[in-house]
Amino acid sequence: MATLYLVATPIGNLNDFSPRAAEVLKSVDQIACEDTRTSGVLLQHYQINKPTFSFHQHNEHQKVGHIVNLLNSGLNIALISDAGMPGISDPGFLAARAAHQNGHTVSAIPGPDALTTALAACGLPCDRFVFEGFLPPKKGRQTRIRAIADSDITSVVYESPHKLLRFLKQLHEFAGDERWVCVARELTKKFEEIDRGQLGELCKRWSERDSVKGEIVVVISGNGYSE
């Protein structure tokens, strides 16, 4: 029996990488990376010299078999994404499932992720929440946004910078001016920004920007929440 380690990596600041995570990556036989070039920066920074191979959304189904074969041969494998915890809006679920199905140990090495970091900083209720990840670009998008607007608990969405304003405006159609929302941008990085307010105000502020850059998490309060 071998072990598949799912290792959380920094979402921006390299200093957030834990000593335990570094120790695990130094101990395994090979490392599966969402992008070997991106991961190379982290591995070089922590002087981790292990064989790597790609494991991303476009080859995940094909590479699961490769990971299982490595585990079956007795090799311990680590899986890392470009940022955050593998499996959370990143490849990882299929590998973890296959490892379990083949009798191997699966161990998650915790660390920073944008979801909980944004929730902690947003100042909105986070005792219960729904994580929506990335919304579909077209089919089903309106239905999901309406469900977020109707929900009575906090919702969390990952959004790309060029779609942020579109999302805020679509949400505004269903949730109105007074819904409390927090836009968390570039978490843990140099230009980190936590912009919190009511939806009508946020739509106005973000529409006045020339451009929007960086990784974005949007936290939406539940229907009925007020301050």
Image (cartoon, rainbow, N blue to C red):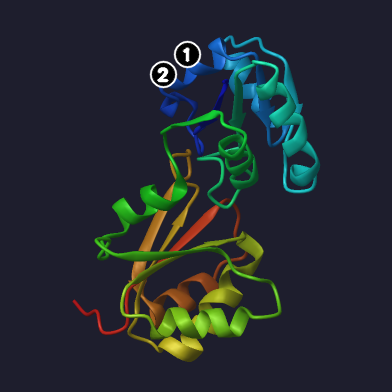
> Is 59 placed above or below 124 here?
above
Q: Quadrant of the N terminus?
A: top right
Q: How many marks?
A: 2
In which quadrant of the rendered view does residue 125 lie? Answer: bottom left
User: Which residue shows up at 60% across the image and 11% down it?
Assistant: 48
Q: Is residue 56 left or right of residue 178?
A: right
- Cα distance, mark 2 to mark 1? 5 Å
User: Which residue shows up at 58% across the image and 51% down it?
Assistant: 214
> Is 41 placed above or below 137 here?
above
Q: Is residue 52 left or right of residue 7?
A: right
Identify which residue, 114 or 95, lies in the foreground: 95
Q: Element type at marker 1?
A: helix
Q: Amino acid at mark 1?
A: Glu
Q: Quadrant of the C terminus?
A: bottom left
Q: Element type at marker 2?
A: helix
Q: Decide: few, some or many residues near mark 1? Use Cα within 10 Å; few <14, some 14-19, many ≥20.
A: few
Percent position of residue 198, x then y: 34, 77
Q: Are marks 2 and 1 in contact (CB under 8 Å)?
A: yes
User: Which residue shows up at 53% across the image and 49% down it?
Assistant: 88
**Disc 2: which residue:** 20
